[in-house]
Image (cartoon, grey):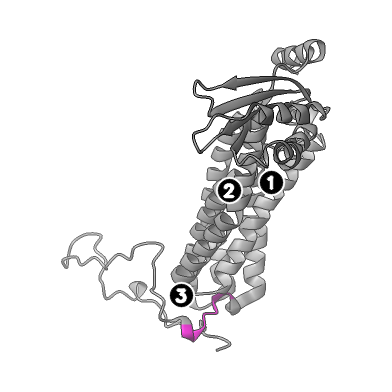
Amino acid sequence: MTGNVRGGRSVSEKFGTGLITNDIVVVSENGSAIDDSALRSLIDQLGTDPLYGDTEIVLSEDGTVAMVSAVIKTDPSSAAAIDGLTRLRSEHIPAALGSYGYAVYVGGDTASTQDEIDLMLDYLPWVFGFVLGASFLLLMMVFRSIVVPAKAILMNMLSVAAAYGLLVLVFQEGLGATLFGFHQTPVIEFWLPLFLFSILFGLSMDYHVFMLSRIKERYDETGENTAAVVFGLRNTAGIITGAALIMVAVFGGFALGDLSMFQQLGFGLAAAIIIDATLVRSILVPASMELLGDRNWYFPGWLEWLPRLEAEGKSDPVETAPGVPGAVSTDSPALHRRPVPNTQNLGD
């Protein structure tokens, strides 16, 4: 434990957590001064709640805006503080000010954090839906398959879910936290799950597209699924592993810091990349493609109207003059691919 952490805990134990307040802003929208009895009623309501201590009222010059600051007697991020905020908004403020018609806003550390969490939860399904839907559509148009994008999303979600589980296991449950020098915390940073999902899904999809491009290229040439999977894995494993090691080293640098939020960020990213590059990308993806065989490339005929995208640009054959050393004739059999049986519409 660092000196800063020990010092902070000592100050908190000897002198309390400091003057952390919930700030209630009362606004009279009709231009009249705020009734003193309304503010006294609010003070009385706060006095009945054991969470709140001293209160202070500050009025604007015209009396149309008032701020009531109420000291909270606990850590602003604790469950008790959140419960107190809920009581303030759902019980104390309606009971004291509900009949006056004032606009009331609640601020402070607890309120701002809780509002950010609520906002994130509101948009979380939209973010997940957009990322997953756009990924599925783009992969379907690139690889002309509905099985490949569905499996890609499933595999990438496995890496993200594994990172979530390890974060909870190490930082909340404390398993191995001392070994790595991490701070055990009661909660995971509220912004981290969405952040990790966005970053990890993009990195995992990058690996996946890189490998699938090689597999699809070989499959189009030979029509043999097993040989294509072997070719793709053999030609991309080294590059994927090297890139993963670089990212693990970079993310590991965050985990070496003293701040818990950066430890969680670096550990979550590094752990997910290790799992994705080894277990998922090198074992699960090739094994699933081998088991599915030609069904990997199933594409319903009624979707043929979708535009065809290319993951890599196609280069035209290079024409060279006869007699030029090293020239490759465009008539060479090596430049012509074998006809591939129509296996993309299996099951139509």
Image location (x, y in percent) of residue 117: 64, 42
Residue at 82% in and 29% down: 48
Of labels 1 and 3, earlier in sequence is: 1
- How many numbered discs? 3
Please state which of the two labelled residues, at mark 1 or mark 3, is closer to the viewer.
1
Residue 191 seen by the camera: no
Q: State if disc 3 and disc 1 touch (CB < 8 Å).
A: no
Q: Quadrant of residue 20?
A: top right
Q: State if disc 2 and disc 3 touch (CB < 8 Å).
A: no
Q: Residues within 10 Å of mark 2 (few under 14, many from 20)?
A: many
Circle 3: element type = helix
- To which residue does mark 3 refer? 220
The Cα atoms of the two marked residues, 3 and 2, are separated by 30 Å
Magenta stretch in the rendered image: 296-302
Q: Nearer the viewer, residue 58 or 6?
A: 58
- To which residue does mark 2 refer? 200
The quadrant the N terminus occupies is top right
Whether residue 330 sits left or right of residue 186 in the image: it is left
Residue at 34% in and 63% down: 313
